Image (cartoon, rainbow, N blue to C red):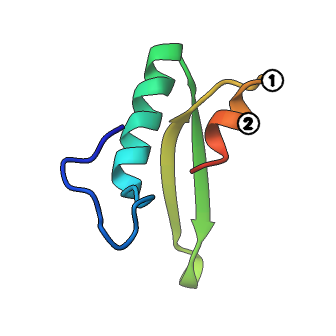
């Protein structure tokens, strides 16, 4: 992916929002599956976050480790 404006002090900089957007598009194109994470907080409250991820397989680790 190419940025409209490059960061002159950090040429390798890539905003996480763009990386995640490309990840979501790749998962959608391949037909991923849902992953839900739950975090128990104070007083028994629970926060959850659901996202689509690649299905389990040989090639998926290489494509997700940069996240």
Which residue sits at x=20%, y=55%? 5
* Dot 2 crowding, Cα within 10 Å, few <14, some 14–19, many 20+: few
Q: Is residue 5 above or below residue 53?
A: below
Would you say 4 lies left or right of 32 here? Answer: left
Would you say 52 lies left or right of 62 here? Answer: left
Task: Point out residue 6 in the picture as x, y percentages from the top left corner.
Answer: 27, 57
Asked whether 3 or 30 is in front, the reply is: 3
Which residue in the rendered view is the most extreme toward the bottom? 42
Asked whether 3 or 59 is in front, the reply is: 3
Q: Is residue 30 above or below residue 67?
A: above
Q: Are marks 2 and 1 in contact (CB under 8 Å)?
A: yes
Which residue sits at x=29%, y=65%? 7
Asked whether 19 or 42 is in front, the reply is: 19
Which residue sits at x=50%, y=26%? 27
Task: Point out residue 47 in the picture as x, y percentages from the top left corner.
Answer: 50, 64
Would you say 35 lies left or right of 4 here? Answer: right
As helix, strand or loop, the secondary structure at mark 1 comes to: loop
Which residue in the rendered view is the most extreme toward the top? 30
> In which quadrant of the rendered image does the N terminus lie?
top left
Where on the picture, by quarter, is residue 36? top right
Q: Is residue 37 above or below residue 34?
A: below
Q: Which mark is residue 58?
A: 1
Which residue sits at x=35%, y=52%? 17
Q: CA distance from mark 2 to mark 1?
A: 7 Å
As helix, strand or loop, the secondary structure at mark 2 comes to: helix
Would you say 10 lies left or right of 46 here? Answer: left
């Amino acid at each position: 992916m190419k940025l409209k404006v490059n960061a002159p002090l950090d040429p390798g900089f890539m905003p996480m929002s763009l990386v995640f957007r490309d990840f979501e598009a790749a998962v959608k194109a391949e037909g991923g599956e849902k992953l839900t994470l739950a975090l128990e907080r104070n007083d028994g409250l629970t926060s959850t976050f659901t996202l689509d991820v690649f299905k389990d397989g040989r090639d998926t680790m290489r494509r997700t480790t940069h996240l």
